[in-house]
Image: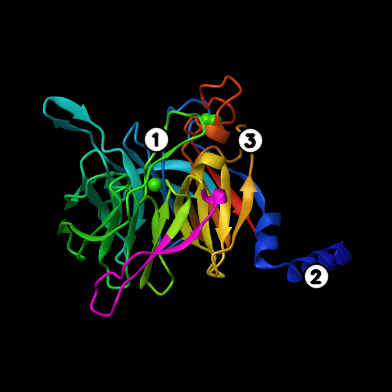
Amino acid sequence: MLRLFIVTILLCASLSPVEAAQNARASLLIDFDPNSAAQTVIVESIAVDSKGMLYACDRVSGNVWRIDPKNPTLIVVGRVEEREIDGKKVRANVSGIAFNHAGDLFLTAGGFKEVLRLRGRDLNPEKPGVAQTFATETEGANGIAFDKNGNLYVSGGGNGRIYRTGPEGGRAEVFAQIAAHSRTLPDGKTQQSLTANGIVFDPQGTTLYVTDTARGAIWKVAIGADGRAAQPALMTQSSLLEGADGPAFDPQSNLWVAANERNAVVLVQPDGKVYDVQKNDSKGPLEFPTCVVFVGATAYVSNFDTPRRDNLAADGKSSIDGIGASIIKIDP
Ligand SMILES: [Ca+2]
Ligand SMILES: [Ca+2]
Ligand SMILES: [Ca+2]
């Protein structure tokens, strides 16, 4: 037993970070609806608080859940409510979710063209808080990130914009622009034109990384000392990145990206080289993954389970294979 342990340690020590990631084990953390594999729950992204708890917002029920990765059950701690707009019920359609340094939770609401906020004190299982408007004029609001000064950044999906507000929110301004691009997916009909999808800051909080789902690419937007954006620079483009979303840095400063179209999670080295970490067919554990977050060296990935490309079920039209909306854990 001890020998096995020592051999394992030596083996791990000799692995490169890429090999270690590729040898990591992917397993289910939580199935959002154990009674169904259909899209009864729709979760695009996960957030992590300072204690390593996970948070997710379901578009269908509007519930904001807290999930303890050590004891994974769904605890409702907040709510996102529908609105009546021009006589119709409109869902917030939350895509991105992130905490700021003060411990408040922010959610991008593409349905409202807004960013919503839940104060940390209102994330309460006894009396779940209701998310309120924080930033406006964020059309297509999708990814979300904060810089080291607490400014809020929001991606605009298909319009390629990166919006920004100060730490107090309010009307967003266009901070940077990823050039438009559209691509016909292998099904011959779906147009993929999301050029500004998931966003994340580097560990220094000074360069914003943008996943370009349409091109299968990563852009870097450096922020100068004057707070202005440099021209977006293409970091890398790869067929492995088709469907890129939900980026996160691992402890070695490699960027992990959910490649939703490919049912894969990929690793992008600082030099731009791209490798598959996990990839599988429509049966999972990855089912159209859309977001990666880290707690220590463990990656958590949310499954959106859209019926497309490598996630298309055996029936050729649904995503009913696998278990549906869920969170997957990738252990080092
Ligand atoms: Ca399920
Ligand atoms: Ca996204
Ligand atoms: Ca599925």
Q: Which residue is depicted at the point 41% across and 52% down? A: 212
Relative image position of residue 113 (x, y in whole percent) = 21, 44
Q: Earlier in the sequence, mark 3 or mark 1?
A: 1
Relative image position of residue 260 (x, y in whole percent) = 50, 42
Q: Which residue is depicted at the point 38% across and 42% down? A: 182
Quadrant holding the N terminus: bottom right
Looking at the rendering, the stretch of residues picked out in magenta corresponds to 219-241
Label 1 crowd (10 A; few <14 / some 14-19 / many >=20): some
Q: Which residue is mark 1?
A: 191
Query: What's the distance in space between the residues labelled 2 and 1, CA to CA?
Result: 48 Å
Relative image position of residue 262 (x, y in whole percent) = 56, 41
Q: Considering depth in this image, is 57 or 303 the residue closer to the camera?
A: 303
Left or right: where does residue 34 sit relative to residue 196?
Answer: right
Label 3 vs label 1, nearer the camera: 1
Q: Earlier in the sequence, mark 3 or mark 2?
A: 2
Relative image position of residue 205 (x, y in whole percent) = 37, 71
Q: Considering depth in this image, is 150 or 186 the residue closer to the camera?
A: 186
Q: Which mark is residue 234?
A: none
Secondary structure beneath dot 3 equals: loop
Q: Is 95 colored magenta in this rendering?
A: no
Query: What's the distance in space between the residues labelled 3 and 1, CA to CA?
Result: 22 Å
Q: Considering depth in this image, is 318 or 44 the residue closer to the camera?
A: 318
Q: Which residue is mark 2?
A: 10
Type of the residue with mark 1:
Gln
Task: Give the quadrant of residue 315.
Answer: top right
Q: Which residue is depicted at the point 86% across and 62% down? A: 4
Label 3 vs label 2, nearer the camera: 3
Can residue 69 be spotted in the picture? no
